[in-house]
Image (tube, grey):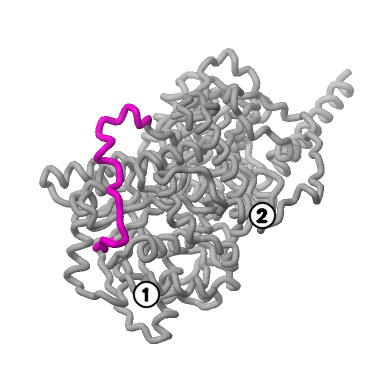
């Protein structure tokens, strides 16, 4: 009997080790990666259960007859449409970019982004046509059921009796969006994971994992201690480089949104306190953290104990807090942007209590805006020269950021009088709902310029080209400025600085960087390969949150593009520096004027441009200026 019992025990331990090894080797599971989910979520409960063991659905092979030629797609993007003159205002730059398909070299995903734009543009124009015929029930026709929701929730814990499910996020995530999960680790191992998955990237059959957050309570093949592993996955590049917390090399960690990649308090907790049941979960953690001893560590998750975990999107990455304490930060990686997120998947040994997604991107209902008239952009005329044209980079679902800009620095007298014009440059979104709301917003305020491509970060240089086109071909501006929708611009001070500098030609004004090197880390958002830029350093360039060029430089950029001589480089601010360096070689006398009051990261008193400002900070900065308190910040980031 003892031998039989011992044999069963040994066999059980062996199976447990095999199971553990399998989970470590393939923490997601192939069926989890390959099982497709419907992209059309209309009428579906946003919280649906996944069957982790279901076989992948059979995909119908795409026949060659279904492949649409690129020329046909480009033609559909620029074909004449049945839209009004007011609606045409958002396409003034669009119509100058018909030959964009010929200038894709050096920009990742460029051709695919134009092809994808052809499909989503046709869908949007179909909705516009249906609206005119009175048959449209989408957000264009005023239907609220399809608008981007501000929050999603599943609060009834009795319904969450399975550990594998997905939360569909119809309009993506943006800065300030958060996903909060209340749960209790359980099961044999207590391992669980959160995956932010997105729409498939160009040329890739499987959706990418924009954030893989894996909690391993009993360690893995590298450690026996509990550990949190963060990573990304794409079909083209497989898994990226793991970021572990606790980190095996904490000296190499960097800040993300000024927060530690891994909080130094995270580690294997006090065994005695962890195993005794005399303390509540909260009091046990509190005693560990507040103890003055540096040797005291704690791990934020433990089998059988509830937790409240929030993953929040920042300006540089995604932060995790557990029970109100910062635990990890994960820097955004190249091409894997929050707006792409379409689902949050949670799986593993976890009893779920509730899930809440909040701060999701959604537009304001113009019918309920009392100050609508002063938010609309003044009409422009090429016959009336501008002192300054400001082009603002924005993504389709950044509704709140654009509204904050309209309510703050776009209310400067110079902007309202028409001496300065401001336009948002926005690429198309993959989601039909987002594009419909963007179209509504564009025709309501008259300050959006749509771009004929899906808005991947690697293509923002095309927006810089678009800004130069608008500032010289659509209107006639003495100076052309580029900024971002999370930057607060003191328009009056920019004009005063340009007047003081008094350089009508050959000027690059901003925070000048004269000695920078390419990022060679493949996981970096700003990664540049030796093939893209073989030299060790860049020519002088101005940081992207706010720089100004004179009309002659903007006009030369447009001219070089028409001749096919404009080098496309995916870092747009560096690209402008490269273009100006080429002009300098051809004889242009260039003046680089640096202003350290243009802050690339955050805000400091006396700013001319403050970056990484959310909608609330924008409104606060504007209120201080209106109250005569000057350029004082509303809290350091």
- Who comes first in sequence, dot 2 or dot 1? 2
Residue 308 visible somewhere in the drawing: no
Mark 1 — residue? 514
Q: Is residue 200 left or right of residue 483?
A: right
Q: Is residue 110 left or right of residue 412?
A: right
Highlighted magenta segment, given as a residue range: 365-388
| Quarter of the image where one finds residue 521 | bottom right
| Quarter of the image where one finds residue 587 | bottom left
Q: Dots 2 and 1: beta carbons under 8 Å?
A: no
Mark 2 — residue? 72
- Residue at far top of view: 158
Q: How packed is label 1: few (under 14 Cα within 10 Å), some, or many (20 or more)?
A: some
Q: Residue at x 45, y 51 (%)?
A: 91
| Quarter of the image where one finds residue 586 | bottom left
- The residue nearer to you, when weighing 166 against 379, is 379
- The residue nearer to you, when weighing 531 against 567, is 567
């Amino acid at each position: 009997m003892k031998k039989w019992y011992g044999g069963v025990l040994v066999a059980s331990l062996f199976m447990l080790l095999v199971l553990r090894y399998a989970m470590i080797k393939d923490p997601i599971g192939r069926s989890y990666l390959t099982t497709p989910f419907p992209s059309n979520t209309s009428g579906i409960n946003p919280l649906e259960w996944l069957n982790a063991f279901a076989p992948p659905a059979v995909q119908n092979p795409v026949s060659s007859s279904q492949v649409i030629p690129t020329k046909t797609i480009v033609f559909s993007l620029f074909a004449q449409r049945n839209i009004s003159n007011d609606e045409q205002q958002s396409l003034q730059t669009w119509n100058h970019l018909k030959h964009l398909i010929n200038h894709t070299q050096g920009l990742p995903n460029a051709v695919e982004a134009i092809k994808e734009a052809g499909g989503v543009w046709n869908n949007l124009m179909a909705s516009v046509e249906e609206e005119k015929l009175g048959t449209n029930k989408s957000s264009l026709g005023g239907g609220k059921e399809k608008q981007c929701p501000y929050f999603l929730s599943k609060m009834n814990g009795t319904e969450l009796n399975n550990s594998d499910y997905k939360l569909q996020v119809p309009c993506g995530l943006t800065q300030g969006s958060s996903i909060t999960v209340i749960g209790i680790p359980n099961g044999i191992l207590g391992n669980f994971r959160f995956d932010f998955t997105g729409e498939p990237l160009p040329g890739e059959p499987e959706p990418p994992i924009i954030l893989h957050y894996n909690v391993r309570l009993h360690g893995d093949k590298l450690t026996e201690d509990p550990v949190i592993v963060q990573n990304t996955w794409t079909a083209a590049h497989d898994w990226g480089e793991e970021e572990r917390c606790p980190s095996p090399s904490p000296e190499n960690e960097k800040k993300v949104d000024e927060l530690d990649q891994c909080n130094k308090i995270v580690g294997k907790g006090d065994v005695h306190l962890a195993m005794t049941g005399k303390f509540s979960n909260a009091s046990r953690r509190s005693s560990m953290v507040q103890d003055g001893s540096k040797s005291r560590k704690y791990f934020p998750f433990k089998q059988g104990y509830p937790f409240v975990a929030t993953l929040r999107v920042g300006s540089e990455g995604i932060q995790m807090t557990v029970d109100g304490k910062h635990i990890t930060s994960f820097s955004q990686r190249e091409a894997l942007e929050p707006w792409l997120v379409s689902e949050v998947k949670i799986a593993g040994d976890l009893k779920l209590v509730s899930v809440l997604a909040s701060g999701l991107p959604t537009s304001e209902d113009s019918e309920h805006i009392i100050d609508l008239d002063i938010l609309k952009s003044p009409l422009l005329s090429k016959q009336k020269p501008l002192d300054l044209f400001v082009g603002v980079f924005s993504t389709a679902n950044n509704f709140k950021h654009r509204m904050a800009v309209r309510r703050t620095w776009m209310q400067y007298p110079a902007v309202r009088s028409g001496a300065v014009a401001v336009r948002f440059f926005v690429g198309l979104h993959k989601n039909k709902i987002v594009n419909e709301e963007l179209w509504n917003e564009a025709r309501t305020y008259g300050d959006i310029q749509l771009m004929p491509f899906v808005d991947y970060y690697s293509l923002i240089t095309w927006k810089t080209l678009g800004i130069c086109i608008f500032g010289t071909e659509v209107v006639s501006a003495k100076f052309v400025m580029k900024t971002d929708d999370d930057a607060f611009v003191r328009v009056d001070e920019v004009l005063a600085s340009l007047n003081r500098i008094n350089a009508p030609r050959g000027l690059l004004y901003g925070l000048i960087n004269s000695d920078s090197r390419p990022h060679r880390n493949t996981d970096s958002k700003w990664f540049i390969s030796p093939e893209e830029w073989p030299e060790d350093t860049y020519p002088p360039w101005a940081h992207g949150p706010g720089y100004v060029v004179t009309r002659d430089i903007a006009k030369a950029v447009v001219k070089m593009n028409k001749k096919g001589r404009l080098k496309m480089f995916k870092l747009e601010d560096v690209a402008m520096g490269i273009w100006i360096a080429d002009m300098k070689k051809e004889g242009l006398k260039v003046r680089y004027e640096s202003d350290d009051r243009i802050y690339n990261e955050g805000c400091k008193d006396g700013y001319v441009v403050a970056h990484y400002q959310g909608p609330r900070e924008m409104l606060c900065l504007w209120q201080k200026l209106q109250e005569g308190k000057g350029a004082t910040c509303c809290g350091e980031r």
